[in-house]
Image (tube, grey):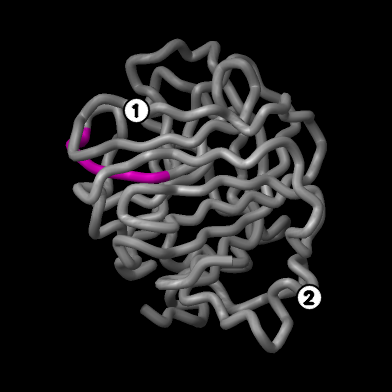
Amino acid sequence: MKIYGTAKGGAINKKDFGVAFGGDETPEPDFQSDFSSTDGWVTTGNPTIDTTAESIKYNNVANGADNRIYNSSIGAVNDEKWCMRFKFNTSAYNIPNIYILALFDAVGNPTTTTQSCIGLFLSENGRFMPCQKTDESNYIDFGVVTDMNFDVSTDTDYYCQVQRTSETNVEYKIFSDSTFETQVGSTSNMTVTSDIDGLDVAQTGTQTDGSSSRTMSANLYNLQIWDDYNF
């Protein structure tokens, strides 16, 4: 699952992730998008790719409509082991309940599409929350999980790490630094089933039957995915 270059979602660029992504012992990511190009990304409504800021830009993204962006060229990740990292910064939110980013097995509106996914959510109480869907059409299933035990501050860089460590476990950590060394809050582990497999789409999402007063403005930078690898 090696995908590089702008034709598959953005050239390799380690400028924002420091030595953690440049050391000899860390392999190159199997998929990378630095968002300097829109190649590979498709948008429905809002958000968009901001090639100037080099980010996914969530410009007051609201529930109540199908607002999402996706890339279906990432290649299917291993069903037992993978890692996804990105930087996230929100400037404002209001009881959002919005997918920040998840890996899905099918493109489509998360509210109505039968699909599986594993991802990261910004909950209505302003916390990072693990989330999943298992071959279902309902918007989201938090499973039996806890959040990362801190409130998300605005205008703050968070370095997010989601990694599947087995068929049945996904580990979540948030860091304050680009080297992914200084953790913020607590580690959260989410139990999943082996039925969540064939994940090959990176996608955001909103709840189309939710309230349009639930909003989020943010930027997501430097998406990197390692297949068959954990940190």
Left or right: residue 12 versus residue 201 is right
On the image, the x and y values in percent for residue 126 come to 65, 22
Assess whether residue 151 is covered by the magenta stretch.
no
Residue 115 x/y as whole percent: 22, 41
Image marks 1 and 2: residues in contact by CB distance under 8 Å? no
* Residue beneath disc 1: 141
Residue topped by disc 2:
19
Please give the name of the residue rendered at 34% of the width and 28% of the height, measured from the top-left corner. 141
| Numbered disc 1: secondary structure | loop
Residue 29 percent across, percent down from the top left: 54, 75
Q: Main secondary structure of the magenta part?
A: strand
| Three-letter code for the amino acid on which mark 1 is drawn | Asp
Magenta stretch, residue numbers: 113-118
Residue displayed at 48% across by 71% down = 229
Above or below, comparing residue 99 to residue 14 in the picture:
above
Q: Quadrant of the C terminus?
A: bottom right
